């Protein structure tokens, strides 16, 4: 546990001493704020037809942030250490591979959640000044953050996997972008009203991430979606662990 | 367990795709020894060290550190070593003290232990002044000492240093070397280098490596004695060259001679004696008898450099 905390704290610390960390924070805050501005201007004085969170997730900004921010957050996890050689000093201390993988994942995930704090601020502002009961309640906010957290965990786990494959940060970012795009493609195909006849289509229909996120933002936590995202996260963590271990087989 | 040698390597082989980095090497290092691995780039020094530190596995053969197998009991081995890789990679964004604390905690030291040990190693490595500076802004000499401080912070039984003085200026080299010497006694140290005087000055034993094999393993003094038998005598004498050549031909003890013109009337003679006989009194007597002038008469002591060149060249010729 001590090793895990030491590692995770250092990993998290690097985001706050690097320019990339602050640029990511600023970019997410900007995109969030911008989306809210556009949303409120478009509405004028009309009352909220839906909770603000759900409105927010109807814009593509969330997915944009998820895709880009995660690639930026995760690309340096392993690739940078391998490139600079500190991976060797890390792996020759008495740490286990599992500790390294979980610590790096946790630090990246915590940082990702921190980048979503401005979103909370925007919601708070709306609740305070719009003064409408239907705009926001606790359940909706919790559901939204569960969704953000779960999708983030999944995207970070494959971002970390991509980073573990290479010693070049750009390559790592490209791999995770490509994987993210593929997932978006699948989600697009499995849009609303997609009903599968064959088993392939049924599998595909489970990857309707846009629909799933809309549900979270509506305050509905669907256990099927939770289970899918959690198991995909574990799958990629497991694959990352195998990649890290692979240096012992070579 | 305490009687086991610190390092025990037997029939270790490492093959990368299409290339053999280590070819069946075996050696042992006793506790408290300072051993230098010497060899040109690509001889297999770093590979040996990486295997010993548990970073990569060997293709075949076994290596044990303090009685633990480096592959099967990797974590136990890693607990007992302090390893500084080639080029000394550090986290450039961290401060010196913060970095050492991070490393000490990773290596299993408690909060209070680490605080105490960090103070000690900062002192030992003369880093106290820069303990709050950011590593990325330090000069190379300081960075190197940070790497050393990291290697010794948890008081490991075995310290493995891969090229610890590469790229330093002479003054910094001396500091680092002194530091390594001070580690002797309480720790076992394995250092690699392709710089000869370094190994000669710091190590109690030298292993010369080439193409993944260990060619020689002895104390620097013994290697020197071995070479001294083949020592050369240099004499600078003011005399006609043909007369000198004639004299050397007459002397039965001379195996090989070489006469070349030095400045002025002097001739520089390089003489190799049979069976390591010291020719100097004979040469002096000859010069005196002939009434020549003599301005230099020395027996060249072989530095490790000559031994190294000789051993590696002999091996290359054998293969050719």
Image (cartoon, helix red, strand yellow):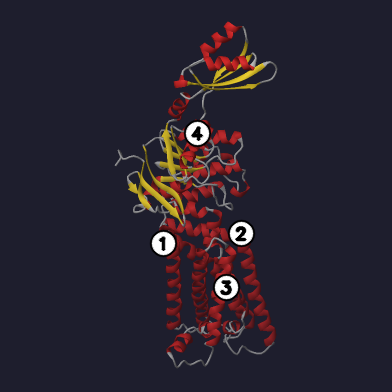
**Picture quarter with the N terminus of chain B:** top left
**What chain letter is assigned to the residue under label 2?**
A
Q: Secondary structure at mark 4?
A: helix
Nearer the observer: mark 3 or 1; the answer is 3
Q: Residue at x 45, y 73 (%)?
A: A233
**Same chain for the residues under marks 2 and 4 in the image:** no
**Marks 3/1: CA–CA distance:** 25 Å
Q: Residues within 10 Å of mark 4 (few under 14, many from 20)?
A: few
**What chain letter is assigned to the residue under label 3?**
A
**Same chain for the residues under marks 3 and 1 in the image:** yes
Marks 2/3 in contact by CB < 8 Å: the verdict is no
For residue A4, which quarter of the picture?
Answer: bottom left
Label 3 sits on residue? A177
Marks 4/3 in contact by CB < 8 Å: the verdict is no
Q: Residue at x 62, y 9 (%)?
A: B292
Q: Residues within 10 Å of mark 2 (few under 14, many from 20)?
A: few
Marks 3/1 in contact by CB < 8 Å: the verdict is no
Percent of width and height locating residue B117: 46, 42
Q: Secondary structure at mark 1?
A: helix
Residue B64 vs A209, above or below: the answer is above
Which numbered dot is residue B310?
A: 4
**Same chain for the residues under marks 4 and 3 in the image:** no
**Marks 4/3: CA–CA distance:** 56 Å
Q: Residue at x 66, y 21 (%)?
A: B261
**Same chain for the residues under marks 4 and 1 in the image:** no
Nearer the observer: mark 2 or 4; the answer is 4
* N-term mark: 2 or 3: 2
Which numbered dot is residue A18?
A: 2
**Marks 2/3: CA–CA distance:** 22 Å
Percent of width and height locating residue B98: 53, 49
Nearer the observer: mark 4 or 3; the answer is 4
């Amino acid at each position: 546990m001590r090793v895990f905390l030491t590692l995770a704290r250092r990993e998290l610390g690097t985001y706050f001493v690097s320019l990339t960390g602050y640029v990511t924070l600023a970019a997410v805050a900007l995109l969030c704020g911008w989306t809210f501005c556009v949303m409120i201007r478009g509405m004028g004085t009309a009352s909220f037809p839906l909770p603000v969170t759900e409105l927010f997730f109807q814009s593509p900004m969330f997915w944009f942030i998820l895709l880009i921010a995660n690639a930026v957050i995760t690309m340096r996890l392993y690739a940078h250490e391998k490139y600079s050689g500190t991976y060797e000093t890390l792996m020759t201390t008495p740490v286990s591979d599992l500790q390294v993988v979980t610590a790096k994942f946790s630090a990246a995930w915590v940082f990702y959640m921190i980048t979503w704090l401005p979103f909370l601020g925007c919601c708070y502002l709306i609740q305070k000044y719009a003064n409408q009961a239907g705009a926001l309640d606790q359940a909706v906010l919790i559901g939204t953050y569960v969704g953000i957290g779960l999708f983030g965990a999944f995207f970070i786990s494959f971002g970390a996997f991509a980073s573990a494959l290479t010693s070049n940060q750009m390559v790592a970012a490209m791999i995770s972008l490509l994987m993210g795009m593929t997932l978006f493609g699948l989600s697009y195909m499995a849009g609303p009203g997609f009903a599968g006849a064959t088993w392939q289509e049924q599998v595909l229909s489970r990857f309707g991430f846009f629909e799933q996120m809309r549900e979270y933002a509506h305050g509905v936590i669907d256990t099927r979606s939770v289970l899918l995202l959690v198991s995909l996260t574990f799958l990629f963590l497991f694959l990352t662990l195998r990649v890290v271990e692979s240096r012992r087989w070579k | 367990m305490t009687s086991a040698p610190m390092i025990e390597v037997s029939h270790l082989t490492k093959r990368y795709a299409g290339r053999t980095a280590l070819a069946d090497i075996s050696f042992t290092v006793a506790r408290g020894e300072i051993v230098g691995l010497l060899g040109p780039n690509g001889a297999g020094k770093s590979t040996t060290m990486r295997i010993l530190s548990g970073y990569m596995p060997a293709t075949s053969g076994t290596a044990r550190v303090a009685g633990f197998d480096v592959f099967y009991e990797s974590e136990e081995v890693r607990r007992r070593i302090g390893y500084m890789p080639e080029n000394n990679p550090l986290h450039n964004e961290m401060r010196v003290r913060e970095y050492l604390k991070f490393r000490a905690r990773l290596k299993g030291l408690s909060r209070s232990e680490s605080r105490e040990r960090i103070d000690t190693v900062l002192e030992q490595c003369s880093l106290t002044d820069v303990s709050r500076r950011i590593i990325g802004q330090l000069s190379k000499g300081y960075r190197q000492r940070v790497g050393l401080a990291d290697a010794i912070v948890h008081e490991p039984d075995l310290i493995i240093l891969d090229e610890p003085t590469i790229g330093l200026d002479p003054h910094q080299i001396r500091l680092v070397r002194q530091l390594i010497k001070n580690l002797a006694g309480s720790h076992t140290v394995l250092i690699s280098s392709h710089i000869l005087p370094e190994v000669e000055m710091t190590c109690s034993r030298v292993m010369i490596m080439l193409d993944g094999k260990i060619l020689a393993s002895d104390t620097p003094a013994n290697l020197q004695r071995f070479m001294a038998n083949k020592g050369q005598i240099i004499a600078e004498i003011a005399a006609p060259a043909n007369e000198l050549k004639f004299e050397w031909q007459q002397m039965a003890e001379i195996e090989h001679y070489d006469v070349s013109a030095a400045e002025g009337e002097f001739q520089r003679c390089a003489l190799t004696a049979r069976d390591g006989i010291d020719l100097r009194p004979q040469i002096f007597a000859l010069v005196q008898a002939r009434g020549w002038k003599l301005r230099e008469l020395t027996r060249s002591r072989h530095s490790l450099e000559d031994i190294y060149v000789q051993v590696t060249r002999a091996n290359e010729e054998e293969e050719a």
